[in-house]
Every structure is written in structure tokens, then in C-alpha cells.
Amino acid sequence: MKIRFIEPGNLPYRRSIKNLYVYDKYIRTPSNGIITLATVLKSRYPDVFCYSESISKIKYDDIYNADIVFISIFTFNANRGYETAERIRRNSSALIVFGGLHATLDWRETIKHCDYVIRGEGDEVLIPFVEAIESGSVPELPGVVMRRNGEVTSFGEPVPPTKLDIVPDRDLMYNFRKMAKRCTLWPQVHASRGCPHNCDYCSLVAAFGRKVRTRSPQNVVEDIRAAIDFFGKRMLNILWITDDNFFADRKWAVETLNAIIDSGIRYSFTIQARFEVGFDDEMLDLLKRAGVDEIAMGIEFLDDRSFAEYHKKSTYDEILRSVKNIQSHGIRTRGLFIFGADDHTPGIGKQLADFVIANNICGVLIQSMYFVPGTPVYESHKELLIDAGDWSRCVGKTVHYPKNMTPAELQREVITASRLIYSRRRLLDAVLHKRGTERILFIGEYFWQREVRKDMKRELKYLESLTQ
Ligand code: SF4
């Protein structure tokens, strides 16, 4: 069996000087998910390989004569995935199978573009799935959806895998080793899955559930070592632990951090967390000793009404106290924010910039709220979507009619926040007064945000036309 995986790029990779030195318009790192799944299949089938349009063009000559092509989609690249599937369909008899977050949640849409959808994480379904196809039988497995002769059959809900101790073989991704030298790519390790919370807009918890499942600390250390070796020496030696909430299982988090410390690995880590970690002094000490220099916190909003509205269990006061305590342990805080909540009004951009600057948040990711089918926020806002069905703008741009602003006003607020946070004056300040990693990151992000703003500004006319 010849098996290929594809991760479509909403903005397919184009060779550019920007890919060498600064962030490109979108952060470009192939997701761990498809490499992990390819590694699983490779243990049974020798001819497995992956392409990610975030780092290379797809070699279609290698795709067309495959037996099975798996295409993995998030929401932002779903349309590109469908186009890719149509191209393969026109030129090949390969079986086309979709998976990934968007396919899991919106499988009724995705199945129109392929032969099968595999919902859920897939780790324990892929081998029996391919074995069934190879033997000519129907893969009646949990999470599998089949389209045959126009009829769609779902074989039940996916079952989350329990054996997660897999070290992804990054060499299964075309061009990855070469591209790993670029400063726009980060080594990544995903150590646990699931989150016990239930924020209305969170597609991850909608897809992967609230039960937290973890890899063994030794396996995480092995993967970290492999990722560091794979990426080699770089200008910035930072590894991103991509779990959505690393501290959801505290006991395991302590064991894993201790395992990193005991391993003797000396590297710099960024980790994602909720605000609670900022009240856990023992954990913060451990993080610092393990090499975690930065916590990326999903702060999302700055007003308690929005926290309550979207069932995000936080308050403004808790966030503030947490950020200060994290920083007092010598750890930087990065903020992830959402604009476009029902209570947001013009002025939110300046308010966020003031908060970020006053509280020394080292960097931000600001996204207009987007709505993945299958999440509560999609159900409550689906009538307000602009261009429903075109998911390609779900990269932080305005995709809905907010309650208290026009779509153009919302996009302007994102632009304003970015312009104030990444201003020339702050760039100069970073160059003169910040040191090491923090300085390099700010400079990189300054140019990245400039690209993002340019792209957003180009769309303002279109967004204005929607309310004229
Ligand atoms: S805390 Fe984060 S990962 Fe957990 S449900 Fe909320 S947004 Fe999702």
C-alpha cells in the first residue's frame, strides 16, 4: 500500500526571504498530528510519506499513484483541502480520506469531498482502517464515515485513543529537515490531549473531549530530545510544548517537568496554560528549573461579562494577579486574545494595547472570534456569519457581524491593537533595552504583525461594503 498524507496550506508555501529570517504572514510549522499518524502507519506499512503546504509544495506526481491519500484539515485550511481533494480526484484513483479537527466536527460537510472521513484522533483506528481497505472489506470502525454511491454511512462516535506514547518521525515529512533551519519554524512537542474546561468557542475540547490523556514523562522527554536533535542549532533555541492546557493534570505535569530536569536537557520552552498556574508557586519554580521561560496564556478577554458569556472560567482580576506572579518568577507571559465578543465595542483595540503594555506582556496573538461547526458558539452565532462556508478567512480576520460594531470596525480594532503593541517606538525600545531571546522575538513579531496588518487593511473595503 502506498499511503500519503497532506496538510493543506491556506496560503500555500512560496519561497521567500521572509521564510528565512522572520515570521511569515502565518506561522508555518507542520502540525505534529499528521506526522504522529504517519509514524503509526509506518510501523505497519513501509511506504508512508507526508507533505505540508506550510513548508513545501506538494509533489503531485508522488500523490497521484498512491493507494490512499489522507488529508488533514483545521478550519482555516478546509477549503484548500477540498480543492486539493478535487485535484487528486481528477488525476488519480486514490482513495481520499479526510481527518483533523474540522473534519471531525463538520464531517457532514467534509464527507461531500471524499470517500471517507475519520473523526477524532485516529491513532488507534488508522491501521485497522487501512487493513480493511487492503482486504476489500468495509472499515466499520468507530469514528469512520463512508460515502459510497452518494450514500453516507457513519459507523459511530470516535473513541479517544489511550496509548499516546508515540515519538513522531519528523523525517516522514517532505522537506522538514531542510526547512527546520528557518527561524519561522519551531520545534514542537505535544504531550497531553483534552481539557477539563468547556469554553464555548473551543474546537479542541469539542473534538477531543474533556478527559485529559497524557504521554508518559519518559516518552515526552524522548520526543523533546528527538525534536531538538532534528532542528539542530538555531538562532533561537525555543521548543513549543503545544498542549492546550499542560497543567490540566497537575500530578503528571509535575512528573513531566521533573523528568525534563533530570534528563539534563538544557533548552528554552514555551508552554500554554490557563491563569491558575500563576497561583502555583511550586509549579512556577519547577517550570523555571525545567527551562520554561515563557507561558502563553489564553487570556481571551479583558471583561468579566465576556468570560461569563462564553463560559471561560476566569476573571480580569485573576488574570492580572496571575500574570504578575508568573513574571515575579522570571517567566515571560504571552497573551492570546479574542476580539468580537458580543459585548465588545469600538475602543477594545486601544484598551488591549494599554493592558499589554502596562503589564509587560511580551507578545500577543489577537484573533477575531471564529466559529467552528460543532462548538456552542457556532450554534449561537451561525446566522451572523459572513461568507458562511468559506473558512479560509478564519485566521484571525473578521468573519461575523458582531453585535456592537460593524465587521469593518472589528477588523480595525485588531489592526489598532497590533499597531500600538508593535509600534516603531516599542521596536526601538526592544532593540535598545531588551536582551537575548526577548529582543529577537519582538523584532521578529514586529515584522510579522506588519504583514498581518497589511493583509487585514486590504480587506477593509470589502468589510465596509457589507454594511453599506
Ligand atoms: S481552557 Fe483552553 S483548551 Fe480548555 S476548553 Fe477553554 S479554550 Fe479550550
Image (cartoon, rainbow, N blue to C red):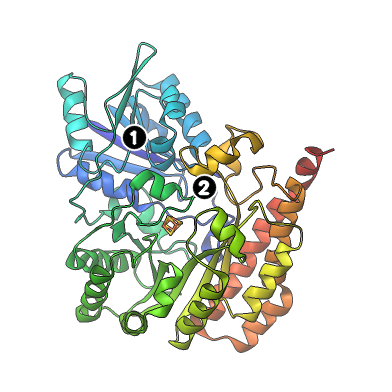
Q: Give residue 193's quadrant in the image.
A: bottom left
Give the labeled residue for mark 1: 70
Give residue 200's position: percent from left, percent from top.
49, 49
Identified by mark 1, the residue type is Phe
* Residue 386 drawn above or below residue 350: above
**Which residue is painted at 57% across and 62% down in the image?**
337
Disc 2 to disc 1, C-alpha distance: 19 Å
Q: How crowded is the residue under tag 1: few (<14 C-alpha within 10 Å), some, or many (20+)?
A: many
Measured as percent of width and height from the top left, residue 305 is found at 61, 60
Q: How many marks?
A: 2
Residue assigned mark 2: 13
Q: Secondary structure at mark 2?
A: loop
Q: Is residue 422 visible?
A: no
Q: Which mark is residue 330?
A: none
Where residue 375 appears, as percent x and y from the top left, is 47, 42
The answer to whether 178 appears left or right of 304 in the picture is left
Looking at the image, residue 153 sits to the left or right of residue 298; the answer is left
